[in-house]
Image (cartoon, rainbow, N blue to C red):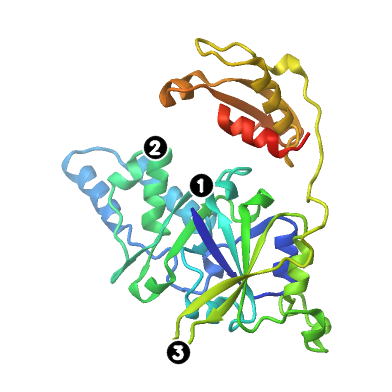
């Protein structure tokens, strides 16, 4: 899924982009003062009813509910994205009156290295939401998402044009991602192209105001295979479009180009009912050890459950990205995908 983030185009924006992270703010730092506006009184009314008519002690449950809402209001961060890159108002509001840029993310790749709490499309309504007890009584990953959809994912219909998609994290703060999640950069109509086009006093401004140009963005992202587009105004229209432009640094060395070590002791060559040549496992090892975030292999084997589900052999590779971080990064390959990826290595 493609998602877009409009940026002012400051040195601070470029620093985050170059170093593969974004900042997930607390809702109080967003531009809508009605963030996290929800009514939980019906839940307490329900608990009071149980207490009064069924003589059930609900103090512990009431305190748990209160603690949950406290966490949502104080700890949950919201990173707001859009499903469109062509909204002129978003360019005006969030991209410094069309002088900034917009980042295109691959959502699945964006959340691959680090876990998030929830993600969802924003729902636009006329009135703030009311919470019911059944929304907070469940305890599954999906129920947490459903709860946050209500507490943190409903806004006034006046915001509907933003087509917003949200990522929620606990706690809020810095979020590192796989650099390959950034697929493209779209430059605003008024964004300066070269450093010489920037204002003379620009360098003296603080990093959150000091602007950057298209050339600086391309330089910061060189070697990453990012595509670049220039926003344009359609003739005789208020509508936007974009055209692809050349990367000024397209011949630079590949970013994070390294080769790790893999012991074949961690490769299970067994086919488990599927006919699969040993070379495919070895080719996956060659592919994986060139992964930019590869630190140590956990295993390469035939994914029997996934193979049975798809009706063809699927090879699984699991690896760790850093020492003492045991969250496994997972990759699944069909035999055709292995051959294609291996051939692209040009060994």
Find the distance from the CA under tag 2 to the CA under tag 1.
13 Å
Give the residue displayed 40% in from the left and 61% down from the top.
Answer: 122
Relative height, residue 78 to residue 66 (above, below)? below
Q: Earlier in the sequence, mark 3 or mark 2?
A: 2
Of 70 and 314, the residue lying toward us: 314
The answer to whether the residues at label 1 and label 3 have Cβ atoms under 8 Å apart is: no
Could you say where residue 192 lies in the image, as x and y percent from the top left?
Answer: 71, 82
Label annotation for residue 139: 2
Of 137 and 52, the residue lying toward us: 137
Label annotation for residue 236: 3
| SS at circle 1 | loop
Q: Earlier in the sequence, mark 1 or mark 3?
A: 1
Query: Horizontally, is 236 left or right of 49 in the view?
Result: right
| Disc 1: CA contacts within 10 A as few (<14), some (14-19) or many (>=20) | some
Residue 328 appears anywhere in the view: no
Could you say where residue 231 lies in the image, as x and y percent from the top left?
Answer: 58, 76
The residue singled out by tag 1 in the image is 117
| SS at circle 2 | loop
The answer to whether the residues at label 3 and label 2 have Cβ atoms under 8 Å apart is: no
| Disc 3: CA contacts within 10 A as few (<14), some (14-19) or many (>=20) | few
Query: Horizontally, is 42 left or right of 306 in the view?
Result: left
Query: Horizontally, is 53 left or right of 192 in the view?
Result: left
Of 198 and 150, the residue lying toward us: 198
The answer to whether the residues at label 2 and label 1 have Cβ atoms under 8 Å apart is: no
């Amino acid at each position: 899924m493609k998602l877009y983030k409009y940026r002012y185009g400051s040195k601070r924006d470029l620093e985050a982009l170059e170093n593969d992270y974004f900042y997930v703010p607390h809702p109080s730092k967003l531009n809508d003062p009605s963030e996290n506006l929800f009514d939980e009184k019906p839940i307490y009314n329900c608990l009071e009813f149980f207490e009064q008519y069924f003589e059930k002690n609900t103090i512990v449950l009431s305190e748990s509910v209160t603690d949950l809402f406290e966490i949502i209001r104080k700890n949950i961060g919201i990173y707001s994205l859009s499903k469109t890159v062509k909204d002129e108002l978003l360019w005006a509001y969030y991209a410094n009156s069309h002088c900034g840029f917009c980042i295109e993310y691959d959502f699945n790749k964006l959340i691959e290295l680090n876990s998030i709490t929830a993600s969802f499309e924003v729902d636009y309504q006329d009135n703030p939401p009311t919470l019911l007890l059944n929304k907070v009584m469940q305890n599954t990953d999906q129920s947490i998402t459903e709860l946050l959809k209500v507490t943190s994912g409903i806004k006034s219909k006046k915001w509907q044009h933003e087509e917003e998609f949200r990522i929620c994290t606990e706690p809020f703060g810095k979020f590192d991602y796989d650099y390959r999640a950034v697929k493209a950069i779209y430059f605003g109509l008024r964004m300066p192209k070269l450093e010489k086009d920037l204002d003379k006093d620009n360098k003296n401004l603080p990093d959150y105001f000091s602007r950057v140009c298209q050339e600086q963005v391309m330089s910061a992202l060189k070697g990453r295979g990012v595509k670049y587009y220039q926003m344009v105004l359609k003739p005789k229209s208020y509508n936007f479009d974009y055209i692809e432009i050349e990367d000024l640094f397209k011949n630079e060395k590949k970013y994070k180009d390294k080769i790790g070590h893999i012991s074949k002791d961690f490769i299970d060559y067994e086919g488990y009912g599927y006919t699969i040549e040993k070379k495919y496992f070895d080719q996956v090892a060659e592919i994986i050890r060139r992964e930019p975030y590869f630190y140590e292999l956990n295993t390469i084997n035939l994914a029997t459950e996934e193979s049975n589900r798809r009706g063809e052999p699927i090879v699984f590779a699991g690896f760790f990205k850093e020492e003492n971080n045991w969250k496994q990064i997972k990759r699944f390959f069909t035999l055709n995908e292995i051959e294609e990826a291996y051939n692209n290595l040009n060994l």
